[in-house]
Image (cartoon, rainbow, N blue to C red):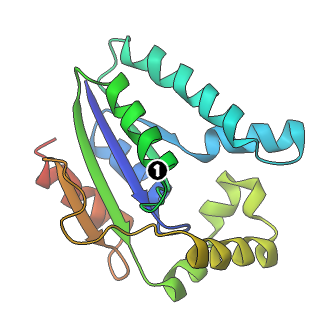
């Protein structure tokens, strides 16, 4: 089994890269809004504790399956012990699995453009109010550190990709080749 974690700032292209990866590797895509959107639909706001509990049950069930692997996309604030511990907990569930860590980076102006793409808006209803979504992105950029520092990520199977000027399809190809998937 394989687990690919794709992380990066809001609207960097995590889900879109994941969508391209599933086209070339027999993995299942579990992008973060698959759990966020239903919670918002029911409660009107994202209850992140509930979202984490639901995700953990999905991870535990998936790790026991015979499926080839999963791509999980998420934002990780590298200054947040809670985020780092949560990521470690996910990886621990997949302890008998090959884990690959992909970090995507792109400048804020690129991400603001991507924030309004049709694919993103189709897949993430909570992002359709673009004024509010842009405000969240800018606020997250001010309050969170979604990009690791050089040498900070200690995974053996790790790659950091600046995807500002390359397509999601190209990024998926780079990931496949780098990890020989």
Taking depth in this image into account, of 57 and 152 the one nearest to the observer is: 152
Q: In this view, does 130 lie to the left or right of 56?
A: right
Q: In which quarter of the image is residue 120?
A: bottom right
Residue 68 left/right relative to 79:
left
Disc 1 designates what residue? 81
Q: Nearer the viewer, residue 148 or 109?
A: 148
Depth check: 11 or 151 in front? 151
Asked if residue 144 is positioned above or below residue 78 in the image, the reply reads below
Residue 117 rendering spot, x and y as whole percentages:
62, 71
Where does residue 110 sit, x and y in percent of width and height? 50, 84
- Confirm whether residue 116 shows in the render: no
Decide: is 115 above or below 127. below
Task: Residue at 60% x, 61% y: name it.
Answer: 119
Q: In this view, does 124 lie to the left or right of 153?
A: right
Q: Locate residue 144, reporting x and y percent.
A: 54, 69
Look at the image and tell me in which quarter the N terminus lies: top left
The local crowd at label 1, few if under 14, some if 14 to 19, many if 20 or more residues have their Cα within 10 Å, is few
Q: Which residue lies furthest to the bottom in this view?
A: 109
- Image point (65%, 37%), residue name: 35
The answer to whether any part of residue 170 appears in the image is yes
The secondary structure type at the circle numbered 1 is helix
Position of residue 150 relative to residue 86, above or below, is: below
């Amino acid at each position: 089994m394989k687990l690919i974690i794709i992380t990066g700032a809001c609207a960097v292209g995590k889900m879109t890269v994941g969508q391209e990866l599933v086209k070339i590797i027999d993995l299942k895509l579990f992008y973060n809004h698959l759990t966020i959107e239903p919670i918002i639909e029911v409660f009107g706001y994202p209850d992140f504790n509930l979202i984490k509990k639901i995700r953990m049950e999905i991870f535990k069930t998936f790790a026991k399956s015979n499926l080839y692997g999963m791509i999980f996309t998420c934002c990780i604030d590298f200054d947040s012990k809670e985020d780092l511990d949560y990521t470690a907990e996910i990886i621990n569930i997949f302890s008998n699995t090959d884990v690959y860590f992909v970090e995507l980076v792109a400048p804020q102006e690129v991400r603001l453009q991507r924030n309004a793409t049709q694919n993103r808006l189709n897949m993430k209803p909570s992002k359709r109010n673009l004024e509010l979504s842009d405000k969240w992105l800018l606020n997250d950029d001010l309050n969170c550190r979604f990009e690791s520092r050089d040498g900070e990520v200690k995974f053996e199977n790790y790659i950091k990709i600046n995807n500002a000027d390359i397509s999601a399809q190209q990024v998926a190809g780079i990931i496949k080749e780098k990890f020989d998937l």
